[in-house]
Amino acid sequence: MKKLLVLAVIAGIGFYAYKKYTESQDDADLWSEPSQAPDLR
């Protein structure tokens, strides 16, 4: 039973870290476009 609980906690931490990483990437992608120089072609 303890092993299952530890596994669930580790999985939860992994999911939380993955979610934070993807949110960070989404935020970086969102701000990279407006901060680039305009295309004046």
Image: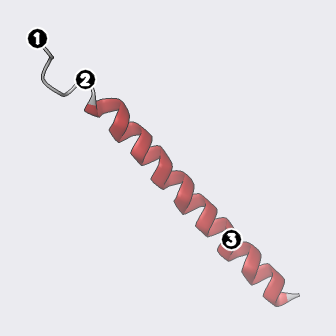
Seen at 89% across and 87% down, the residue is 1
Q: Residue at x 39, y 38 (%)?
A: 27
Disc nearest the viewer among 3 and 1 = 1
Badge 3 density bin: few <14, some 14–19, many ≥20, Cα 10 Å: few
- Which element type, helix, strand or loop, lies under badge 2? loop
Residue 18 vertical position relative to residue 39 in the rendered view, above or below: below
Q: On screen, 18 above or below 32? A: below
Tell me the amino acid under the disc marked 3.
Ala
- Indicate whether 38 appears above or below 10: above
Q: Are marks 3 and 1 in contact (CB under 8 Å)?
A: no
Task: Please name the amino acid that badge 2 sits on.
Answer: Pro
- Residue depicted at x 17% and y 27%: 36
Q: In the drawing, what numbered circle is on residue 34?
A: 2
Q: Secondary structure at mark 3?
A: helix
Quadrant position of residue 6? bottom right
Q: Is residue 8 above or below residue 20?
A: below
Q: Any mark on residue 40, and which?
A: 1
Instruction: From the viewer's perspective, tell me whether residue 19 is left or right of residue 6.
Output: left
Discs 2/3, front: 2
- Return the x and y of residue 19 as percentages of the image width and height: 56, 52
- Closer to the chain start, of discs 2 and 3, is 3
Tag 3 residue: 11
Q: Is residue 29 left or right of residue 22?
A: left
Q: Which comes before the other along the chain, label 1 or label 2?
A: 2
Q: Position of residue 13 (x, y in %)?
A: 61, 68
Q: Residue furthest bottom?
A: 2
Seen from this angle, which residue lies furthest top? 41
Dot 1 amino acid type? Leu
Near-viewer residue (4 or 36): 36
Q: Residues within 10 Å of mark 1 (few under 14, many from 20)?
A: few
Cα–Cα gap, marks 2 and 3: 36 Å
Distance from Cα at disc 3 to Cα at disc 1: 48 Å
